[in-house]
Amino acid sequence: MNKQLISLLLMLILLMVPQISSAESQENTSIFQIKIISPEQITDYPGKDVNIKISVKNMTDKEIKDVFTYITMANISKTWTVNLEDYSADQPITIGTISPHEEKIVELPIKLVYSADYYLYTTVLSKDSLNITSSHAIPVKILGNTRLVPLQVQIVSIAVPLLLLIALALTFKQRRAASA
Amino acid sequence: MIYELVKKETKEHIFSRKGIGFLFIVSILLSIMSFGFISVKELSLLDQPSIVMTTFKLLLGINILISMVIGSTMVAGEKEKGTLESLLLTPLTKRKIIIGKLIAILVFWLTVTLISLPYFIVLSNGTSMLPTILFYLYVVGTVLVISFSSIALIFSTILASTKNAMIVGLMIFLITLVPMFLSTTMKKAGFAKLIQSYSPISASMKTMKDLFINKLGALDILVGMVPVFVFFVLALSVSLLISKKVDFLGGE
Amino acid sequence: MIKTIGLRKVYNNDYEAVKHLDLNVGRGDIYGFLGPNGAGKTTTIRMLTGLIEPTEGMVFFNDREVSKGKQELKNNIGVLPESHGYYEWMTGKQYLLFFASLYGMNKASRIQRTNDVLEMVDLTEKANIRIHQYSRGMKQRLGIARTLLHEPQIIFLDEPTLGLDPQGQKDIENILVQLNKEQGVTIFITSHLLKDIERICNRVAIVQRGSLLVEDTIPSLLTTYEAMIEKENVNLEDVFFFLTDEKRGESKHDL
């Protein structure tokens, strides 16, 4: 019984190893290294243009062709994805060919638009490989700029329709008087 | 003469129960939206440029709709009521009749802008957006309203019934709104891209964003507004040309 | 005052509504334009008043071709179409003031003239009531008042007594006779009420299927057809039916 148990355990361990090693090998075979150099975080108002400076390094001994990189953002406040067209950041930057172990510095522009909290990260890939590499994320806080005075809004929202309602009532009254 | 016709049209369509009713509806919608900006959690997170832009979209959408409804009834309605023949027998030319009715719709729009101003003032409080708001309201908004009203008048002139004129006019409006319902991917290529490029509504929405968010310069704004101006010139020209077709119903 | 030469109208569906009409309306006439339904009366009036273009022929107003002087024509004619509507939300006075303004009158003239025409048609007391409350007769009188605002030389009335009770008809006719006698307004009127036409008109034309059957003064017409009709005390109605009798299959205008 003990022998059977040990054999079973050994078999399980043996089965795990290829997966672990394949997982490791996947990590180890990432052909790029990409990191956001600057900024480390963004806290600013809508309308501002920011350049995300990144470093993309070819980690292999071979030349990698057709390399391009782009920004991705996730809206943390609403737990939504982000339409980058609104932020003028939907166009990838083509790097082209990176020589073995070469590092390229690229700037990706983005405009701050809608107020919320985001995580921003960058991704690099080559058309020649299914290997996709993303950087760590940086926090982006687009500040709400509200100076609304709720009382003012309330007054206008009530007063304007009320005045028009009075005008409407007067036209009804006028009509009735003319008909009488 | 046109002035007197404009006076009559504004009394009939604007400063009447129907007209004031429309204005009341517009104010209610603006009030509901404004209340939402200060009380609904998600809306209260919006920054003021977004608030102003959202308000503009509501205001323009509703007003183009109402202006088209009014425009559809202006000629076809007179045909149906039999009052057009009497008007044609006066020294007023057909073109002046159309111009008078267009000016009346413009007066309606200007009245709406006056009603919307208090809302825009409080919603843009503490920002320097008011001049931009006024520019968008009185330039872009006016051009759009006149364009769509011209289209409504065109169909009101051609068609004998107000109902048909209204349906056709509103269909045209909905077609120009199509780009707003298309996905970003669809708009990047093909027919959808074509509509997006030429739609006056798309161009006006882009202009709004360029003014309030991107804060682009005057030249960029004007270039972006080219489809809007082209649409305006076309719609107005056709409505004036089609004025020759203004005719009464009936024969022997 | 009004003269037509070879007036013809063919509509888009090839329907020939008016065929080579030669009319002559003199200054000061009360001219009756008679015919069965579909005879081309309304089409003729619309061509005479410049509302539609004739297919062929010419219309002269005061010896000037109408197509060359539409503006002058509109300032000198008043028209009450057969089927026409009113801005029912207006009062009678507001309605007249509006139309007076379209003729380019200044404010003082508008008000004065509006009061004058309201008095002519006996609507002064009802001037400030909304038109939707007017009776049919009152609306017709208001319509006539509108045609008179700019003091036209001639007024065209297409079936002005249609749908009115006998008193209403009489009121309209009395107004027209008075206008003609006191102010010298030429009146061009179509109607099916032949007895009334005979009473008020001095000259008539009878048309059928777009063609002119006869045009003459009433006394002359009665004299001409008395012998042919073989009846005592021939009246306009007798002449009309004699000329337009469909059962005989042809019109009797060829003597």
Image (cartoon, rainbow, N blue to C red):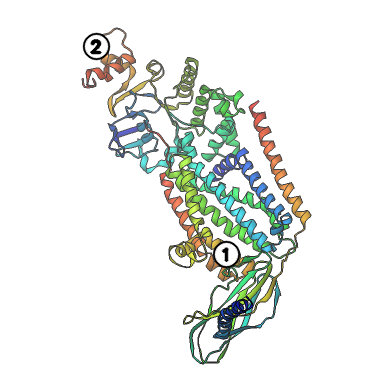
On the image, numbered disc 2 is attached to which residue?
A: C227
Q: Is residue A124 above or below residue A169?
A: below
Amino acid type at mark 1: Thr
Which residue is at the front of the view, C30 or C245?
C245
- In what element is the residue under mark 1? helix
User: Disc 2 or disc 1, which is closer to the eye?
Assistant: 1
- Residue found at the far left of this picture: C255
**Residue at x-position 63% and y-position 67%:** B213
Q: Which mark is residue B207?
A: 1
**Residue at x-position 67% and y-position 48%:** B27
Which residue is at the front of the view, C218 or B45?
B45
Mark 1 nearby-residue class (10 Å; few <14, some 14–19, many ≥20): many
Q: Is residue A33 above or below residue B251?
A: below
Q: Tell me if residue B246 can be seen.
A: yes
Which residue is at the front of the view, B108 or A91?
A91
Q: Position of residue B246 (x, y in %)?
A: 43, 43
**Residue at x-position 58% and y-position 39%:** B12
Amino acid type at mark 2: Ala
